[in-house]
Image (cartoon, rainbow, N blue to C red):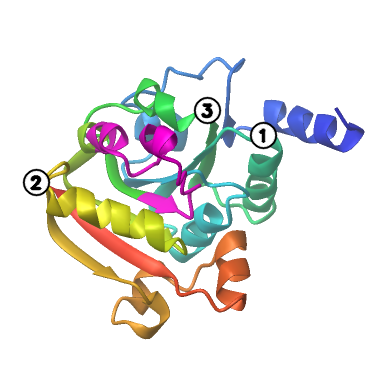
Amino acid sequence: MGRKKLERFQDNAERYNVVQDGKPNFGKLIGKWREEHFKNEQNLVVELGCGRGEYTVGLGEKKPDTNFVGVDIKGSRIWVGSSYAVKNNLDNVAFLRTQIELLDQHFGENEIDEIWVTFPDPRPKDKDEKKRLTAPRHMEVYKRLLKKDGWVKFKTDNTFLFDYTLELFEEGQVKVKNLVHTHDLYNSEFMDEHFGVKTKYEKLFFDKGEDIKYMKFQFA
């Protein structure tokens, strides 16, 4: 492991805004993120597969009256967002280092107000369907953790994953309501819903001419 990565891991271990294995509060904030971590009663928004945290910190800046938690397994990526949050005094931003599959070991039922899924790995192979972050097994977890009528918001450049997700709804494998969607976010009426925040991958794909897909929905 390189020296730079080791230094980043040490920073993560010492920072309050990073929750990870080895810290006293890891796995013990279930249902208590507002009370014990943020120490307020603001709404809680969780970004899954946050990577470097561009979206988590971007939303945190735009909405200081809301708490944001970015979730990713890569500590060196989380360090980037964590550093930005520290530098800019974003006390409403935190990062959880864990696998998405273990999400319900860190959040309680009806605890989350909104979930963002931003540019996840599309996992196009049939054998990897269960690993897609919009697969039914993940959706069931999101439904439990979201407050009643909480929103899921999904952005991707990948047409396959986007259409796969819509098909789940059409086939009734995942029951949703108030679904809205577009295959071209930047030329749609939903443009303002992402607050102008772009992730690293969104910028990359957008600059290559890829249309950005977006949907939001509530569970029925």
The residue wearing badge 2 is 220
* Circles 3, 1 touching at the beta carbon (< 8 Å): no
* Circles 1, 2 touching at the beta carbon (< 8 Å): no
Query: Looking at the image, is mark 3 or mark 2 earlier in the sequence?
Result: 3
The residue wearing badge 3 is 98
> In which quadrant is the N terminus drawn?
top right
Whether 195 is drawn above or below 59: the answer is below
Q: Amino acid at mark 3?
A: Thr
Q: Amino acid at mark 1?
A: Gly
The residue wearing badge 1 is 75
Visible residue check, residue 152: no
Per the model, the C-alpha gap separating discs 1 and 2 is 35 Å
Q: At x 67% / y 34%, what residue is drawn?
A: 75
Helix or strand or loop: what does disc 2 sit on? loop
Q: Amino acid at mark 2?
A: Ala
Per the model, the C-alpha gap separating discs 3 and 2 is 28 Å
Specify whether residue 140 is painted magenta: yes
